[in-house]
Amino acid sequence: MATEPLQTLLEQAFPDATELAVVDRTGGGDHFQVTVASPQFEGLSLVDQHRLVYDALAAPLADGSIHELRIKTKGTP
Amino acid sequence: MTSLRDQISDIIETEPVTLFMKGTPSFVACGNSQRALSALRAAGAPVTAVDILPDPRFRQELSSLSGWPTIPQIFVKGELVGGADIVEELAATGELERKLTDTLGEDYRDDRAERVIALQAA
């Protein structure tokens, strides 16, 4: 899949994001690197931060469109 | 025989550090599992590895138990620490060694032999 639908899902889940990027790591449309900086992450453990990203991308994760997902989250100071 | 779910939760609760991975430490079958294993090794963690590849139910049952959709998954004494990205990040900042010390004690490196536990399909 293309990066745009993932970008859209993340924008919906993190409307206050100060940084939001989706990179197709291999060009094959199924290995993605996602970077999100959002005030929503503040005070959360990394596990809970990543869970929010997984929740936002639950559909493409469940149907196999995403084969591999790398996540980098940041709270915004 | 013990149910799959009970086997998995028993391992998670009992083992100091559990790595659910694709393959085994001597034959890693996925780049992310390798990243997690390398980070744990660098921290001197006593790794107990569980291969989820032999049966698709292993992964299904693990993810339904942990609520974490991807592999690898790393647990320290019953607590989900995260996947490859988090463990790498924690290792880079020294947070991982701190967590291992806090949870397992100062001498956690003494028991660093790697072990593999095989799940039994029902």
Image (tube, grey):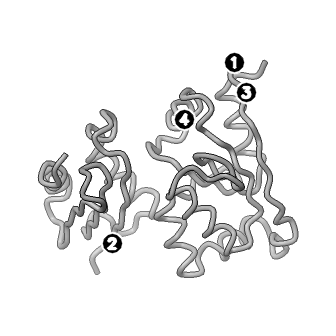
Chain ID at mark 3: B
Give the mark toward the camera: 3 or 2.
Answer: 3
| Kind of residue at disc 2 | Lys
Q: Quadrant of the N terminus of chain A?
A: top left
Q: Are marks 2 and 4 on the same chain?
A: no
Return the residue nearer the eye: A68 or B10. A68
Which residue in the protein does label 4 denote?
Answer: B59
Residue B38 in picture, x, y percent from top left: 62, 68
Residue B43 in picture, x, y percent from top left: 68, 74
Question: Is label 3 in a helix, a strand or a loop?
Answer: loop
| Kind of residue at disc 4 | Arg
Q: Are marks 2 and 1 on the same chain?
A: no
Q: Answer yes or no: do the residues labelled 2 and 4 have beta carbons within 8 Å? A: no
Which residue in the protein does label 1 denote?
Answer: B122
Q: CA distance from mark 1 to mark 4?
A: 14 Å
User: Which class describes the residues within 10 Å of circle 3: few (<14), some (14-19), or many (20+)?
Assistant: some
Q: Answer yes or no: do the residues labelled 3 and 1 have beta carbons within 8 Å? A: yes
| Kind of residue at disc 1 | Ala
Q: CA distance from mark 2 to mark 1?
A: 41 Å
Residue B86 against residue B20 in the figure, above or below? below
Residue A39 in picture, x, y percent from top left: 25, 69
Q: CA distance from mark 3 to mark 1?
A: 6 Å
Chain ID at mark 4: B
Q: Which mark is residue B120?
A: 3
Question: Is label 1 in a helix, a strand or a loop?
Answer: loop
> Is B104 on the left or on the right of B25, as rendered?
right
> Is B100 on the left or on the right of A27, as rendered?
right
Return the residue nearer the eye: B80 or B49. B49
